[in-house]
Image: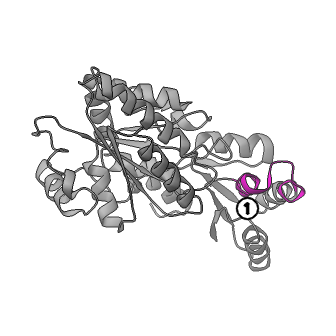
Amino acid sequence: MFVQNPPSIPTLAVSGLLCFLRNTDLVIDWHNFGYSILALKLGASHPLVKVSALYEKLFAKAAAHHITVTNAMARVLRDDYGVTAQALHDRPASLYRPISSQEKAEFLARLPETAQYAQDLLPASKTPWRLIVSSTSWTADEDFSLLLEALSQYSAEATSEVHLPKIVAIITGKGPQKEYYLDQIRKLNQEKKLLNVVILTAWLTPEDYALLLASADLGVSLHTSSSGVDLPMKVVDMFGAGLPVIGWGKFEAWPELVKENVNGKGFESSQQLAEQLIDLFGKNDALLKQLKEGALKESENRWDDEWDKVGGQLFKLI
């Protein structure tokens, strides 16, 4: 029996009991820890969080095999849970792929959010703008204020540094904190702090989201990792589309996915994020091209290859 964690409660207990009764091997696919996600809402010291942590450690031992999305998570399972795990890194679905310049032009002209800026976003434009994309669930594990502050700083810099292009920033996704941040964006516009930046939100089909990633110049990840050892799937998708990424990198597992100055960069503050945008879109466009080449190289790594090395052998499929 193959189950994903989280959700932990009651999945691990139910699956563990069933496997015991049926004499079946249980395999847990660890994407994060349920207690660390619960701690985002209740706080790390809450009794339910502590009970949840003990629950996961207890029922982890019911499994015959463990798969994790990072080497760092496998280390935690070994050191803290007393079980052995194999890392199987997430890879993008076939939907996410690099696209041609013609496909990009057609998509930007078709998408309602970018249609009026389509010509400005193409390299052939006299003064080309830059397109950045960030997908978010608008929840507590993603501090969207970091991006707003960085874009405000970028806009102020672009006012005096005329070589800096304007930015169209598209934020995709739905979630509980969306209205709060939309209100913050409206205030920044009223205060004229986003004169050189256009921030748009969108809810797209999977196909259009994949095309948007492939059409962008830079992806931004605000995932802060509740456990410190999971990785944002959104970055995997961005790499699948050949899109270089800058993201919150202040957690242990980040270097397993993003190689500094090869396919992306990590930041640890809004100031650092602003500096990276100014640098990559300003005089250091050679580095942006280098990151793009690294992301295109990364896009060649696909799910089937990763699965065959770990899952295929574990389940004796190859």
Query: Relative to residue 139, is residue 77 drawn left or right?
Result: right
Farthest right residue in view: 47
Q: Specify how the rendered protein is coloured.
A: one colour
Q: Residue at x 58, y 38 (%)?
A: 253
Q: Position of residue 263 (x, y in %)?
A: 37, 33
Q: Is residue 243 above or below residue 274?
A: below
Report if residue 15 lies within the magenta region.
no
Q: Main secondary structure of the magenta part?
A: helix
Q: Position of residue 118 (x, y in %)?
A: 18, 51
Q: Residue at x 19, y 63 (%)?
A: 110
Q: The C terminus is located in which quarter?
A: bottom left
Residue 128 in sight in this render: yes
Q: Residue at x 64, y 52 (%)?
A: 140
The number of numbered badges drawn on the structure is 1
Q: Nearer the viewer, residue 220 or 171?
A: 171
Report if residue 46 lies within the magenta region.
yes
Which residue lies under the disc numbered 1? Answer: 63
Crowd band around label 1 with a 10 angstrom C-alpha radius: few (<14), some (14–19), many (20+) = many
Q: Nearer the viewer, residue 178 or 100?
A: 178
What is the quadrant of residue 192 in the picture?
top left
Query: Relative to residue 66, is residue 270 drawn left or right?
Result: left
Q: Position of residue 75 (x, y in %)?
A: 69, 40
Q: Secondary structure at mark 1?
A: loop
Q: Nearer the viewer, residue 181 or 292?
A: 181
Q: The N terminus is located in which quarter?
A: bottom right
Q: Which residues are magenta?
A: 33-50
What is the quadrant of residue 66 in the picture?
bottom right
Q: Amino acid at mark 1?
A: Ala
Residue 260 in sight in this render: no
